[in-house]
Image (tube, helix red, strand yellow):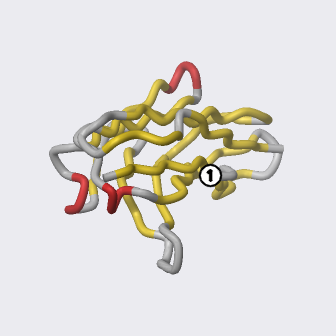
Amino acid sequence: QVQLVESGGGLVQAGGSLRLSCVASGSIFSINAMGWYRQAPGKQRELVATITNTSRINYADSVKGRFTVSRDNAKNTLYLQMNSLKPEDTAVYYCNADVVSVYTGVVNTWGQGTQVTVSS
């Protein structure tokens, strides 16, 4: 009923930038918190940044000052602007959202992920 689709990943050199997008679709009444997580090979999934529906933002220490999370509530879209990328940022990036579904109430939903690879 609710789907998150990420885009914008790719291969970039260290020091470069990428912008990720995540679009929510389906039977959506509203969206509460949204966030970006990432998982590198052999590692656990970790929080990158979250943003509430009142624009309260939280960043992982490792990305503070380099990444910026934002959202467009009218478009049900979450963004992640990533600057000054480092090889250690290489991971699959996942979008997550607490979606208030028209039919089922609050549903925590994950996207399928988008690969970000930073070469040194």
In the picture as drawn, the residue positioned furthest to the front comes out as: 120
Q: Is residue 21 above or below residue 93?
A: above
Residue at (48% x, 47% y) in the render:
34
- Placement of the N terminus among the 4 image quadrants: top right
> On the image, which quarter does residue 102 sit in?
top right
Badge 1 crowding class, 10 Å Cα cut-off, few under 14, some 14 to 19, many 20 or more, is: many
In the picture as drawn, the residue positioned furthest to the top comes out as: 74
What type is the residue that disc 1 sits on? Gly
Label 1 sits on a secondary structure element that is loop
Q: How many marks?
A: 1
State the image coordinates of residue 21 (x, y, percent, origin top left).
52, 33
Q: Is residue 72 left or right of residue 64?
A: right
Q: Is residue 39 above or below residue 67?
A: below
Q: Is residue 65 left or right of residue 53?
A: left
Residue at (58% x, 51% y) in the render:
98
Q: Is residue 6 left or right of residue 34?
A: right
The residue at which mark 1 appears reads as: 113
Q: Nearer the viewer, residue 14 or 2?
A: 14
State the image coordinates of residue 11 (x, y, percent, origin top left).
48, 42
Residue at (47% x, 24% y) in the render:
72
Residue at (47% x, 78% y) in the render:
43
State the image coordinates of residue 40 (x, y, percent, origin top left).
48, 68
